[in-house]
Image: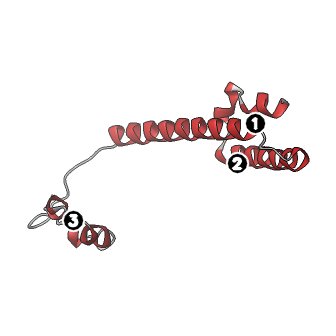
Amino acid sequence: KKMRILLQSPRLHRLRLEEYVRLVTAAEVLAEFGEGCTGREAPLRGTIWAQTRDYYATLHRTRLSTLQTSLDNDYWQPYPCEGGISLISVQELRPFLLATDRPDARQSL
């Protein structure tokens, strides 16, 4: 029960990812131990799942906001290139573009 209270703490979202993973790993071990003793699924599993979903949603939202702020504050200027750039010419994107049937994916920028 104390682990469930800890996992439901509003401060949980302030943990760094590595700290959060260590905490969840410990909670999983505790849940497995409890299941081994009782033969039933631990209610702690539902708490772990819900809190992990919320933690990652907050983490992604925060990181996207940070990225957006960085992109908004950076100075951007067009890169002059003759004839435009085709997405298919970017080697790293080629496997994804060739796998899709979308004609708009191959258009020039």
Circle 3 — which element? helix
Give the crowd class for mark 3: few <14, some 14-19, many >=20 residues within 10 Å: some
Residue displayed at 26% across by 47% down: 76
Q: CA distance from mark 2 to mark 3?
A: 37 Å
Q: CA distance from mark 1 to mark 2?
A: 19 Å
* Residue toward you, 93 or 50: 50
Residue 41 lies, in percent from the top left, at 77, 44
* Residue toward you, 43 or 49: 43
The residue indicated by pointer 2 is: 21
Residue displayed at 10% across by 67% down: 82
* Nearest-to-viewer mark from 3 and 1: 1
Residue displayed at 81% across by 34% down: 3
Amino acid type of disc 3?
A: Leu
Left or right: residue 54 compared with residue 91:
right
* Nearest-to-viewer mark from 2 and 3: 2
Amino acid type of disc 1?
A: Pro
Amino acid type of disc 2?
A: Val
Most extreme residue toward the right, as rendered?
37
| Residue 3 vertical position relative to residue 86 in the rendered view, above or below | above
The residue indicated by pointer 1 is: 43
The residue indicated by pointer 3 is: 87
Circle 1 — which element? loop
Residue 59 lies, in percent from the top left, at 55, 39
Residue 25 lies, in percent from the top left, at 76, 49
Residue displayed at 26% across by 70% down: 90
Give the crowd class for mark 2: few <14, some 14-19, many >=20 residues within 10 Å: few
Give the crowd class for mark 1: few <14, some 14-19, many >=20 residues within 10 Å: few
Left or right: residue 63 compared with residue 102:
right
Left or right: residue 40 compared with residue 73:
right
Q: Earlier in the sequence, mark 1 or mark 2?
A: 2
Residue 58 lies, in percent from the top left, at 54, 35
